[in-house]
Image (cartoon, grey):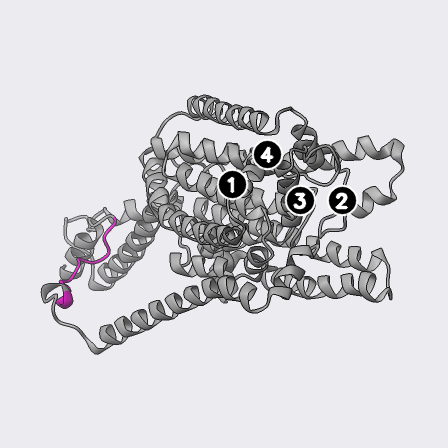
């Protein structure tokens, strides 16, 4: 009888398996155990190490050009760092022409925007390198702010999804064996005289009650936590270090790649979007589009971020954000028209990105193909290649609408791989953002392989280019072959990220299948 009472008492606790016990550390907050002291020391030493590493990464950007000026000049002319769009030497040529009253867009040398030309014309030359260092530090600070805001954004999104009334689907209904067992447990076994059965029957029923209740509690808990968002990321300072210590960002900063300004505008646009600020987000996104054109596809995830943060409808947010974006872009174009004195800069800036007239070797996929292509097919393949860059924007935004920051990461990786004039600076901005989704690492199959391939190709890119141009021991096929490996590594990494996110979402929607799958693997 006592056992049955215990079973009944346990049965009426639907989602709480045990009553919480008071924590002695909470009762005495000033009491510290040796383990907590050791943990605090480790945290303190880790923060000091991160601070020292970040400081060292900043000093490298400042001191290397001073101590090794030849290295800085070499990086500024390398095809891995400098492209016709981002090469600083072409910008200085344009500034020289502007100072002498000559339009920099008359020839086929300057492809930079008039606002950048006017900025560097107004600044003294000794400040030029400091501009790139400050921009790199600002990018790192914006990435850290995005990492911090992501946790708060995920909590808001989690609360929004949890507030929606959900009814269990056919896959998520409580199994019949659990319902029948729990219903059977509520019945009091007795004989015809109203007396209890023997002790053996009571023990069996109480054990069955415990098992049924435990299974019922587990299923109900899974249904309640089905829509919880797993958003664990790396420490924000560690993500900042991933950017500042990245060889791609260091080479781009020392080589004074103008893509640093594109990255700064992109991360600021995303940072303001995740905070729900429409006007500054669209203004910086318009400036990023003005500099590189391809960031226009980020308008969809940015609108998703703003609408979720402000708790407004997507189409209303898209209308207002699109209006702010169009006005900002029109203002930038009008300002460029007043600086350049004509609209000829459009053909030299946006036209160069679209039509790819300059086939200088770079780490992309375009230059070699269009060198070998017949002129009658050029227009068709230009359209196909350009469409291939932007065609993923809408499908990916729809598929991962509940993870708009992940959409930003994927689209940046796609642009870095498929744009007409890529360089190291494009990888520098999206690779640290992979740290925002540390939960996906356990689902990724090719993470080590793709990163190893990326490192392998990064080392061989300058070697193969030197074999071709320096020694003359090879030809263009040497360099283009390793650029294919470099692009393939990015493709594998991007596909692995997408597959991991899909698997993670599936396990959140089907927690019982996840548990059964884990049990099979454990056995």
Q: CA distance from mark 4 to mark 1?
A: 12 Å
As helix, strand or loop, the secondary structure at mark 3 comes to helix
Which of disc 4 and disc 2 is earlier in sequence? 4
- N-terminal label among 1 and 3: 3
Q: Nearer the viewer, mark 4 or mark 1?
A: 1
- The residue depicted at 10 percent of the width and 67 percent of the height is 28
Mark drawn on residue 122: 1
Q: Mark 2 to mark 3: distance in Å?
A: 25 Å
Disc 2 or disc 3, which is closer to the eye? 3
Percent position (x, y) of residue 295? 57, 37
Q: Nearer the viewer, residue 498 or 170?
A: 498
Which residue is the site of mark 4?
Answer: 114
Question: Mark 2 or 4, which is nearer the eye?
Answer: 4
Image side of residue 19 versus residue 419, left or right: left
Instruction: Kindly report the distance in space between the C-alpha atoms of the residues bearing marks 2 and 4.
Output: 26 Å
On the question of residue 392 being in view, the answer is no
Furthest toward the bottom, the residue is 34
Q: Position of residue 352 (x, y in %)?
A: 71, 36
Judged left or right of residue 386, residue 306 is left
Asked if disc 2 and disc 3 are in contact, CB closer than 8 Å, the reply is no
Residue 93: mark in rendering: 3
320 with respect to 349 (left or right): left
Which part of the image, by quadrant, shows the N terminus? Answer: bottom left
Question: Considering only vertical position in the picture, is 486 above or below 258?
Answer: below
């Amino acid at each position: 009888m006592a056992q049955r009472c215990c079973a009944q008492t346990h049965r009426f606790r639907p989602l709480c398996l045990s009553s919480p016990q008071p924590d002695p550390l909470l009762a005495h907050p000033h009491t510290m155990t040796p383990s907590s002291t050791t943990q605090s020391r480790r945290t303190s030493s880790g923060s000091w190490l991160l601070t020292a590493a970040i400081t060292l990464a900043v000093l490298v950007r400042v001191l290397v050009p001073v101590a090794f000026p030849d290295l800085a000049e070499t990086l500024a002319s390398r095809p891995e760092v400098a492209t016709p769009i981002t090469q600083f030497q072409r910008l200085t040529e344009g500034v020289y022409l502007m100072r002498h009253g000559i339009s920099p867009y008359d020839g086929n040398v300057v492809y930079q925007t008039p606002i950048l030309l006017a900025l560097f014309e107004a600044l003294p030359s000794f400040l030029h390198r400091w501009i790139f260092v400050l921009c790199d530090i600002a990018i790192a600070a914006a990435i850290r702010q995005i990492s911090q805001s992501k946790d708060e954004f995920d909590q808001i999104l989690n609360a929004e999804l949890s507030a929606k009334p959900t009814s269990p689907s056919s896959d998520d209904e409580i199994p019949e064996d659990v319902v029948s067992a729990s219903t059977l447990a509520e019945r009091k076994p007795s004989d015809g005289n109203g007396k209890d059965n023997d002790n053996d029957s009571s023990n069996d029923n109480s054990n069955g009650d415990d098992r049924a209740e435990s299974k019922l509690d587990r299923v109900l808990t899974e249904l309640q936590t089905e829509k919880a968002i797993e958003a664990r990321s790396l420490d924000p300072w560690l993500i900042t270090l991933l950017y500042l210590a990245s060889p791609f960002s260091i080479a781009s900063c020392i080589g004074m790649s103008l893509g640093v300004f594109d990255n700064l505008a992109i991360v600021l646009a995303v940072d303001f979007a995740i905070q729900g600020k429409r006007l500054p987000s669209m203004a910086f996104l318009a400036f990023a589009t003005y500099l590189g054109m391809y960031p226009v596809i980020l308008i969809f995830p940015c609108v998703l971020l703003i609408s979720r943060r402000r708790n407004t409808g997507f189409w209303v947010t898209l209308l207002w954000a699109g209006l702010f974006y169009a006005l900002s872009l029109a203002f930038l174009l009008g300002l460029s028209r007043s600086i350049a004195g004509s609209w000829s800069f459009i053909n030299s800036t946006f036209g160069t990105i679209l039509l790819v007239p300059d086939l200088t070797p770079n780490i992309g996929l375009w230059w070699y193909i269009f060198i070998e292509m017949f002129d009658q097919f050029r227009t068709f393949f230009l359209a196909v290649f350009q469409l291939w860059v932007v065609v993923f924007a809408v499908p990916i935004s729809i598929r991962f609408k509940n993870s708009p920051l992940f959409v930003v990461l994927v689209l940046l990786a796609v642009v870095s791989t498929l744009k007409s004039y890529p360089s190291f600076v494009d990888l520098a901005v999206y690779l640290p953002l992979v740290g925002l989704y540390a939960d996906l690492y356990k689902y990724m199959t090719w993470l080590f392989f793709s990163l190893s391939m990326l490192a392998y190709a990064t080392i061989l890119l300058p070697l193969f280019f030197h074999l071709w141009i320096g020694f003359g021991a090879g030809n263009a096929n040497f360099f283009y072959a390793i650029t294919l490996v470099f692009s393939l590594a990015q493709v594998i990494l991007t596909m692995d990220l997408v597959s991991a996110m899909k698997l993670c979402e599936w396990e959140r929607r089907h927690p019982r299948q996840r548990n059964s799958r884990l049990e099979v693997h454990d056995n």
